[in-house]
Image: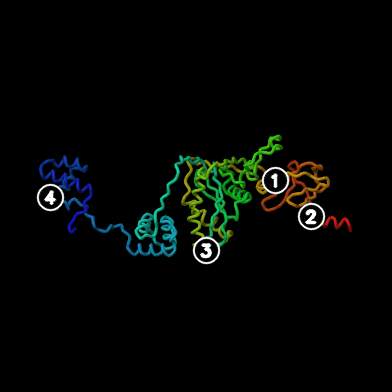
Amino acid sequence: MAGKLLMGQKELIRAKVMEQVVQKELSLKEAALKIKVSYRQAKRIYRRYLQEGDRGLLHRNQGKASGNAYDPGIREAALRVYQERYGDFGPTFAAEKLGECHGIIIDHETLRRWLLAAGLWERKRRRKAYRSRRMRRECFGELLQFDGSHHDWFEGRRSPCCLMNMVDDATGITFSFFCEEETTSDAMRLLWRWIERFGIPQALYCDKKNAFVLSREPTIEEQLAGIEPKSPFERVCEVLGIDVIIANSPQAKGRVERNHGVYQDRLVKELRLAGISTIEEANRYLVQTYLPKINEKFAKAPLRPEDAHVPLTTPTSLDDIFSYETPRVVSNDYVISYKRRLFQIQRNNRLQPKPREKITVRELLDGRIKLLYQNMELEYIELEKISRKEELATRSA
């Protein structure tokens, strides 16, 4: 309707009060108290009401373009680039890329409104089960949350793979790398890299996967010997003095799970934009570019400034700690069998095991084999394994 005023609740109340002042039903001081303004401001409002009527109560900028409004060309350019390159990006991440790569500096909330108005993005609402919040640990290195995330990280440019990821509970600092599968060896490699960079953490929070912990009951022999069965990863943590805490649900280690969600959104798109299609390239990109940027953006200051990491005090090298150890029995001819390979113990060892005694076979992550007897390394040679058929042919010759 032409000439109709768009008055809000505040303007309607002021109009009613000012009319009461005109009719001498209220004094101007009483009117000021009713509309919750100073007496001087009430005088200005009353004067405009007498001069212009209801229109004098409206804000002077009503109907005018905001002085802080973006140029229409910026809006058109932002929406065009978003459609061309960032169609599956959320508004926050898209606003960052528009600023970094195209020089279009806009607030993410402004972009969100533009995208909603243009029908290019839809707000996602999820109803989640109620869970009480667990407070962060106080110090950096007090607790690490640890998990692997299987995903199509390269969007079909190569086969899906796994991202091994660690997140510090106190700060949110994250460290990760790509591998083919979520294996015990890769779990060890990730912890090794964290220790080289930051030190030994106090505790690790992980789930019940066999790559991390053993869930079986101890055998009768283990019960009689008072041995608690441990996975190779648990043994490594025990040697380093790291407590392993087992999570009973994904939500229990929510920080690393939410971190997976951030990675599956942002990292996938960053790899696409960088044209990366191999694990080797992706791992270099993680270390050189992505992790420093993501930690700077999302990491928080801990509640206490002390670093809970401890230095490595044992004289044993990390090569020997991050390994697989398996007991084996020495045969009568001083040969050890391990993974279909034969190892002949040499005679010149200073401490020599006897036949039927147990020794430890230590397999390092790089594939090297060490034989240990009473914590001493034995000299050995690897024998060429002869098949039963070849052995019978040799005897008959």
* Residue ID at (74%, 49%): 338
Within-10-Å neighbours for mark 4: few <14, some 14–19, many 20+? few
Which kind of residue does numbered mark 2 sit on?
A: Lys
Q: Which residue is mark 1?
A: 325
Q: Are dots 1 and 2 in contact, CB under 8 Å?
A: no
Please identify, in this view, whether the residue under mark 1 or under mark 4 is nearer the observer: 1
Q: Report whether 199 appears left or right of 83.
A: right
Residue with the most extreme left position: 23
Label 2 element class: loop
Which kind of residue does numbered mark 1 sit on?
A: Glu
Q: Are dots 4 and 3 in contact, CB under 8 Å?
A: no
Q: CA distance from mark 4 to mark 3?
A: 68 Å
**Dividing the image into 4 quarters, which one contains the C terminus?**
bottom right
Which kind of residue does numbered mark 4 sit on?
A: Leu
Which kind of residue does numbered mark 3 sit on?
A: Gly
Residue 391 in view (yes/no): yes
Position in image of residue 44 (x %, y %): 17, 48
Rendered image quadrant of residue 67? bottom left
Q: Which residue is mark 3?
A: 275
Q: CA distance from mark 4 to mark 2?
A: 109 Å
Counting residues from the start of the chain, the first of labels 1 and 3 encountered is 3
Q: Which residue is mark 2?
A: 385
Q: Report whether 157 appears left or right of 97.
A: right
Task: Name the one closer to the observer, 207 or 350.
Answer: 207
